[in-house]
Image: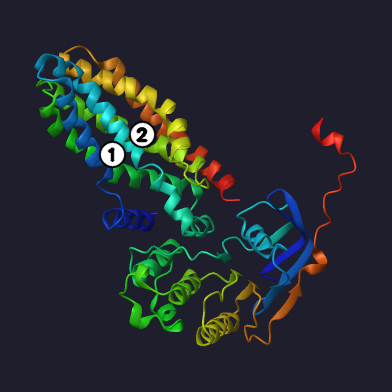
């Protein structure tokens, strides 16, 4: 097991959104999180990544094995594509950025300033960062936003290559990625019960 | 760490990085003060150390909200927080990058601008020394303030209100060193206190900044 989440409960803005979520990922496995807007997919991923504390439950993962990619790509507009990727490669202590550029078709854009890229190209650069981190467990939040059909296929290929290399991925998404081998976890049954306000006055005392 | 420092320095000197912002503000303040005070050389040389220190402090304050706000906006702060770098290291590097792009140019420019304020001859060396000792504390304290206000939209005013009281001891002892230096008085006490403030903030505040940053990223 590379990632195991047990009885996790998370809250967004002080309101519990998910309760009792358990999941496990082994090497070479992908798990897709589904659920309506506001169910807490992003909150769950951030809690697993350690960016926010969980209300209950715990995460078991090897230290330094997780990498998180959220809605924002963390791209600096004033740096070129290569400089952006090389920075993350240095932070994560890896060297090679050429395979990542290759996988996401960024080769022709390598010396372009990131600020001059289109939304989809920026997203591809953000996803290419995952490859240069060299970490085994990817936590992806809506990775395919603003990607076209070809780029989604490109992304599915990258995930498949990562899984074949013994990695794992936890992906929150609404669209079909074409990853037939991925398991799907619907979060709707885990919706947390609303806070019971039976002692209304007591809250203020 | 070094990668983060080089990236921040590179971003600062590229278009829109705000490298010259503090320096330009410092220049404007110091150039305008003699016009406001009028042609009174003796008065100018008496207030010169204080004006130079105040100008440097306000110029430093001007660029504080950029330390974390830009990284927070584009999401790279979240990504840095989940990277192998320890949070204390990230805030220390951010403070160092702020000092190198804002504090150090102010230190180097201050003696040149001292001429405009009729700073007495013996004061130049002490002014340089007091600013070189004091501005790192301004950057480290400012980084703490920036970490406190990182998620807030238009947090600049709150940041200034939080940071200015913390700047007061540095200003008092820094300006005192420069004043006593200019008048040729003994200055080992304020100099030691200034150095102590700087060493203390560098040693302790990164831990506080890292803790509040972790809370603010939730």
Classify A10 as above or below A22: above
Q: Residues within 10 Å of mark 2 (few under 14, many from 20)?
A: many
Residue at left 18%, top 22%? B48
Marks 2 and 1: in contact by CB < 8 Å? yes
**Quadrant position of residue B25:** top left
Q: Is residue B158 left or right of residue A4?
A: left
Say which label, 1 or 2, has the lower sequence index: 1
Classify B22 as above or below A81: above
Residue behind mark 1: B103
What's the chain of the residue with tag 1? B
Q: Is residue A25 visible to the viewer in this orientation of the structure? A: yes
**Quadrant position of residue A1:** bottom right
User: Residue lying farthest right?
Assistant: A198
For the residue labelled by badge 2, is the local secondary structure a helix, a strand or a loop?
helix
Residue at left 39%, top 28%? B167
Q: Position of residue B70 (x, y in %)?
A: 42, 53
Q: Position of residue B165 (x, y in %)?
A: 43, 25
Residue behind mark 2: B138
């Amino acid at each position: 097991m590379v990632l195991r989440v047990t009885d996790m409960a998370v809250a967004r803005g002080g309101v519990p959104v998910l309760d009792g979520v358990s999941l496990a990922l082994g090497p070479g496995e992908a798990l897709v999180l589904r659920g309506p807007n506001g169910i807490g997919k992003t909150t769950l991923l951030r809690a697993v990544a350690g960016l926010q504390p969980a209300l209950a439950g715990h995460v078991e993962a090897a230290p330094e094995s997780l990498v998180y990619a959220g809605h924002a790509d963390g791209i600096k507009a004033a740096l070129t594509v290569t400089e952006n990727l090389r920075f993350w490669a240095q932070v994560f202590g890896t060297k090679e950025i050429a395979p990542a550029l290759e996988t996401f078709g960024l080769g022709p854009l390598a010396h372009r300033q990131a600020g001059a890229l289109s939304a989809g190209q920026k997203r591809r650069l953000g996803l290419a960062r995952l490859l240069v981190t060299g970490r085994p467990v990817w936590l992806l939040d809506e990775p395919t936003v603003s990607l076209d059909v070809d780029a989604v296929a490109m992304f599915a290929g990258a995930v498949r290559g990562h899984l074949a290399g013994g990695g794992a991925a936890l992906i929150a998404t609404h669209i079909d990625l074409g990853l037939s081998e991925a398991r799907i976890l619907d979060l709707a049954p885990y919706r947390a019960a609303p806070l019971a306000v039976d002692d209304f006055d007591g809250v203020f005392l | 760490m070094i990668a983060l420092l080089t990236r921040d320095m590179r971003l600062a000197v590229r278009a829109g990085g705000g490298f010259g912002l503090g320096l330009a503000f410092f220049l404007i303040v110091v150039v305008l003060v003699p016009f406001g005070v009028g042609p009174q050389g003796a008065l100018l040389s008496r207030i010169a150390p204080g004006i130079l220190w105040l100008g440097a402090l306000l110029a430093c304050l001007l660029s504080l909200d950029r330390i974390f706000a830009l990284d927070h906006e584009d999401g790279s702060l979240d990504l840095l927080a989940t990277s192998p770098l320890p949070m204390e290291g990230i805030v220390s590097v951010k403070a160092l990058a702020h000092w190198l792009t804002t504090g150090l140019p102010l230190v180097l420019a201050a003696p040149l601008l001292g001429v405009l304020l009729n700073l007495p001859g013996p004061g130049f060396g002490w002014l340089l020394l007091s600013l070189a000792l004091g501005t790192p504390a301004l950057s480290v304290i400012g980084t703490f303030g920036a970490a406190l206000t990182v998620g807030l939209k238009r947090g600049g005013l709150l940041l200034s209100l939080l940071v200015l009281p913390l700047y007061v001891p540095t200003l008092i002892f820094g300006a005192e060193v420069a004043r006593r230096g200019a008048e040729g008085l003994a200055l080992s006490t304020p100099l030691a206190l200034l150095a102590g403030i700087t060493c203390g903030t560098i040693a302790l505040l990164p831990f506080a900044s890292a803790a509040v940053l972790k809370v603010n990223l939730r």
